């Protein structure tokens, strides 16, 4: 069992002095210690050596202090990856291709119509109806930033099926332009307002050809 440092030092000192007392005459030890100047060097040497050794032991006992224990580092918890929200992920944009039909959507995105879906969307040509469909509103498409930077100009030609109930049945691409101009033209065509065509006193669907012209001079970036 470890003893306190002061107790250990006192026991060492007392043991050293007891050894010195055995070397020097026991009966005259107190008297001789008072007469240290008159003692010979041979008698003083053991006492001096014992005192030097004792002081070194005391100094060494003070140095051997128990080192502090290292502070444990905090445990690092693994960082969990955030959960993916499917509703916030963007779906890849559909690119409009020539001779393909697309359906109008509420959010302005393109939805391609497959051949298996074309059943009841038969439309008449303008010459096949008694009264042609009358377009009352035709918004202009937007010029895309990519088309401006690339300096793209030209015409986009679409064939729009004007439904018998006043809705746009489908949009077919007859001529296209790159850098999103065809897509913005389809978006504008889906906002066309019209009165349905009449055949045999009934409202019918009719194909309507619309052409959108894109010129850099008309884009907002070049306007004063």
Image (cartoon, rainbow, N blue to C red):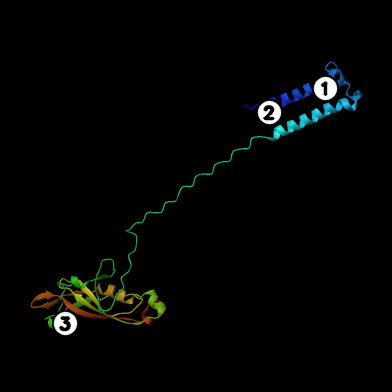
SS class, disc 3: helix
Residue 59 position in % (x across, y down)? 74, 33
Which numbered disc covers residue 91? none
Which residue is disc 3 drawn over?
126
Q: Residue furthest top?
A: 27
- Of label 3 and label 2, which has the lower sequence position? 2
In front of the other: 79 or 212: 79
Q: Can residue 223 be seen in this view?
A: no
Quarter of the image that includes the N terminus:
top right
Residue 34 position in % (x across, y down)? 87, 20
Q: Dot 2 surroundings within 10 Å: few (below 14), some, or many (20 or more)? A: few
Residue at 81% of width from left, 20% of height from top?
22
- Of label 1 and label 3, which has the lower sequence position? 1
Determine the CA span between mark 1 and mark 3. Answer: 139 Å
SS class, disc 1: helix
Which numbered disc covers residue 5? 2
- Mark 1 or 2: in front is 1
132 on left or right of 38: left
91 on left or right of 222: left
Q: Dot 3 surroundings within 10 Å: few (below 14), some, or many (20 or more)? A: some
Residue 4 position in % (x across, y down)? 66, 27
161 on left or right of 49: left
Residue at 86% of width from left, 26% of height from top?
44
Residue at 82% of width from left, 29% of height from top?
49
Q: Which residue lies furthest to the front in this view?
A: 23
Determine the CA span between mark 1 and mark 2. Answer: 27 Å
Mark 1 and mark 2 in contact? Answer it, CB < 8 Å.
no
Which residue is disc 1 drawn over?
23
On the image, which quarter does residue 17 sit in?
A: top right
């Amino acid at each position: 069992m470890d003893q306190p440092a002061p107790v250990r030092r006192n026991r060492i000192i007392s043991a050293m002095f007891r050894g010195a007392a055995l070397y020097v005459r026991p009966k005259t030890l107190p008297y001789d210690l008072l007469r240290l100047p008159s003692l010979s060097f041979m008698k003083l040497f053991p006492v001096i050596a014992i005192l030097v050794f004792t002081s070194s032991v005391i100094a060494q006992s003070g140095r051997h202090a128990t080192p502090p224990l290292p502070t444990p580092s905090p445990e690092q918890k693994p960082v969990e990856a955030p959960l993916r929200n499917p509703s916030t992920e963007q779906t890849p944009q559909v690119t409009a291709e020539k001779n393909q039909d697309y359906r109008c959507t509420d959010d302005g995105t393109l939805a391609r119509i497959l051949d298996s879906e074309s059943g009841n969307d038969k439309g008449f040509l303008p010459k096949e109806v008694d009264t042609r469909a009358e377009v009352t509103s035709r918004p202009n498409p937007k010029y895309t930033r990519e088309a401006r930077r690339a300096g793209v100009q030209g015409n986009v030609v679409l064939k729009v099926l004007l439904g018998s109930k006043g809705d746009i049945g489908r949009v077919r691409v007859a001529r296209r332009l790159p850098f999103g101009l065809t897509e913005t033209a389809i978006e504008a065509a889906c906002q066309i307002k019209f009165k349905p065509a009449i055949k045999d006193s009934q409202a019918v669907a009719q194909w309507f050809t619309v052409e959108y012209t894109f010129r850099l001079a008309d884009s907002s970036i070049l306007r004063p």
